[in-house]
Protein backbone atom coordinates (compact mmCIF):
# COMPACT_ATOMS: atom_id res chain seq x y z
CA UNK A 1 0.00 0.00 0.00
CA UNK A 2 1.31 3.48 -0.82
CA UNK A 3 2.62 5.43 2.15
CA UNK A 4 1.05 8.85 1.71
CA UNK A 5 2.95 10.42 4.59
CA UNK A 6 5.78 11.05 2.12
CA UNK A 7 5.78 14.31 0.18
CA UNK A 8 8.21 15.18 -2.64
CA UNK A 9 10.55 18.04 -1.75
CA UNK A 10 13.37 17.97 -4.34
CA UNK A 11 15.07 16.00 -7.07
CA UNK A 12 18.13 14.05 -5.97
CA UNK A 13 20.31 15.78 -8.57
CA UNK A 14 19.35 19.24 -7.29
CA UNK A 15 21.28 18.68 -4.06
CA UNK A 16 24.98 17.95 -4.22
CA UNK A 17 26.57 15.71 -1.58
CA UNK A 18 27.74 17.81 1.36
CA UNK A 19 25.15 20.52 0.80
CA UNK A 20 21.71 21.41 2.06
CA UNK A 21 18.61 23.17 0.87
CA UNK A 22 15.61 24.97 2.26
CA UNK A 23 12.45 23.10 1.38
CA UNK A 24 8.86 23.50 2.35
CA UNK A 25 5.94 21.12 2.70
CA UNK A 26 2.78 23.16 3.05
CA UNK A 27 3.42 25.51 5.96
CA UNK A 28 6.38 23.57 7.29
CA UNK A 29 9.92 24.70 6.50
CA UNK A 30 12.64 22.09 6.58
CA UNK A 31 16.37 21.83 6.12
CA UNK A 32 17.08 19.03 3.65
CA UNK A 33 20.64 17.77 3.99
CA UNK A 34 22.66 15.44 1.81
CA UNK A 35 25.63 13.60 3.32
CA UNK A 36 27.14 11.37 0.64
CA UNK A 37 24.12 9.58 -0.77
CA UNK A 38 22.07 9.83 2.41
CA UNK A 39 19.43 12.49 2.92
CA UNK A 40 18.25 13.91 6.24
CA UNK A 41 15.54 16.42 7.06
CA UNK A 42 15.25 18.57 10.16
CA UNK A 43 13.01 21.40 11.17
CA UNK A 44 14.02 24.57 9.37
CA UNK A 45 14.60 26.84 12.35
CA UNK A 46 17.12 26.76 15.14
CA UNK A 47 16.03 26.07 18.71
CA UNK A 48 18.04 29.05 19.95
CA UNK A 49 16.43 32.10 18.31
CA UNK A 50 14.86 30.60 15.18
CA UNK A 51 17.86 31.13 12.90
CA UNK A 52 17.43 29.66 9.39
CA UNK A 53 19.19 26.30 9.69
CA UNK A 54 18.80 25.58 6.00
CA UNK A 55 21.20 28.48 5.35
CA UNK A 56 23.72 27.06 7.78
CA UNK A 57 27.07 25.38 7.26
CA UNK A 58 27.45 21.62 6.96
CA UNK A 59 30.54 19.68 8.01
CA UNK A 60 30.06 15.93 7.80
CA UNK A 61 26.78 15.34 9.61
CA UNK A 62 27.05 18.49 11.72
CA UNK A 63 24.94 21.48 10.76
CA UNK A 64 25.86 24.87 12.23
CA UNK A 65 23.28 27.60 12.57
CA UNK A 66 24.28 30.69 10.57
CA UNK A 67 23.30 33.08 13.37
CA UNK A 68 25.18 32.07 16.51
CA UNK A 69 26.72 28.75 15.60
CA UNK A 70 24.66 26.23 17.52
CA UNK A 71 25.51 22.83 16.07
CA UNK A 72 23.26 19.86 15.47
CA UNK A 73 23.81 16.32 14.23
CA UNK A 74 21.43 16.02 11.30
CA UNK A 75 21.02 12.27 11.83
CA UNK A 76 19.39 12.64 15.24
CA UNK A 77 18.69 16.37 15.50
CA UNK A 78 20.71 16.47 18.72
CA UNK A 79 22.53 19.61 19.70
CA UNK A 80 26.27 18.92 19.82
CA UNK A 81 26.73 20.73 23.15
CA UNK A 82 23.58 19.72 24.98
CA UNK A 83 21.97 16.49 23.83
CA UNK A 84 18.79 17.34 25.70
CA UNK A 85 18.18 19.94 22.99
CA UNK A 86 16.94 18.17 19.89
CA UNK A 87 15.56 19.32 16.57
CA UNK A 88 12.55 17.67 15.05
CA UNK A 89 13.75 15.27 12.36
CA UNK A 90 11.78 13.66 9.57
CA UNK A 91 12.05 10.38 7.73
CA UNK A 92 13.38 10.73 4.18
CA UNK A 93 13.31 8.33 1.25
CA UNK A 94 14.34 8.47 -2.39
CA UNK A 95 12.03 7.18 -5.10
CA UNK A 96 12.58 7.52 -8.83
CA UNK A 97 15.18 10.25 -8.34
CA UNK A 98 12.87 12.21 -6.08
CA UNK A 99 13.57 13.05 -2.44
CA UNK A 100 10.49 12.58 -0.27
CA UNK A 101 9.94 13.53 3.36
CA UNK A 102 7.42 12.00 5.75
CA UNK A 103 5.57 14.44 7.98
S1 LIG B 1 19.54 31.26 16.29
FE1 LIG B 1 20.71 29.49 15.89
S2 LIG B 1 22.41 29.71 17.15
FE2 LIG B 1 21.22 31.45 17.62
Image (cartoon, helix red, strand yellow):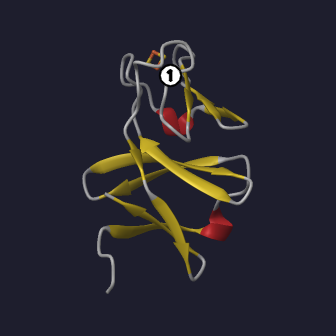
Q: What element does badge 1 sit on?
A: loop
- Residue 22: image location, x then y, percent: 49, 48
Q: Which residue extends farthest left?
A: 27
Q: Residue furthest bottom?
A: 1
Percent position of residue 13, x then y: 68, 69
Q: Position of residue 29 (x, y in %)?
A: 36, 46
State whether label 1 is within 8 Å of ligand 1: no
Residue 54's place in the image compared with 36, above or below, is above
Which residue is drawn at the image coordinates 37% and 69% (left, top)? 7
Q: Quadrant of residue 14?
A: bottom right
Residue 75 or residue 42, whichever sits in front: 75
How crowded pointer 1 is (Cα within 10 Å; few <14, some 14-19, many 20+) is rated as many
Q: What residue is shown at x 71% (from left), y 60% (from top)?
A: 37
Identify the residue shown where x is 59% and y is 56%: 39
- How many numbered discs sit on the rendered protein? 1
- In the drawing, does residue 38 fall left or right of residue 81? right
Q: Locate the C terminus and report the quarter of the image it occupies.
A: bottom left
Image side of residue 73 versus residue 30, left or right: right
Residue under label 1:
79
Residue at 40%, 32% in the rendered image: 87
Screen quadrant of the N terminus: bottom left
Q: Position of residue 12 (x, y in %)?
A: 62, 68
Amino acid sequence: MADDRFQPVARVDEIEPGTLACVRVGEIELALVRVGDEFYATQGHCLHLQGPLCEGRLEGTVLSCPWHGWQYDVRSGENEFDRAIQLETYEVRVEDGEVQVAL
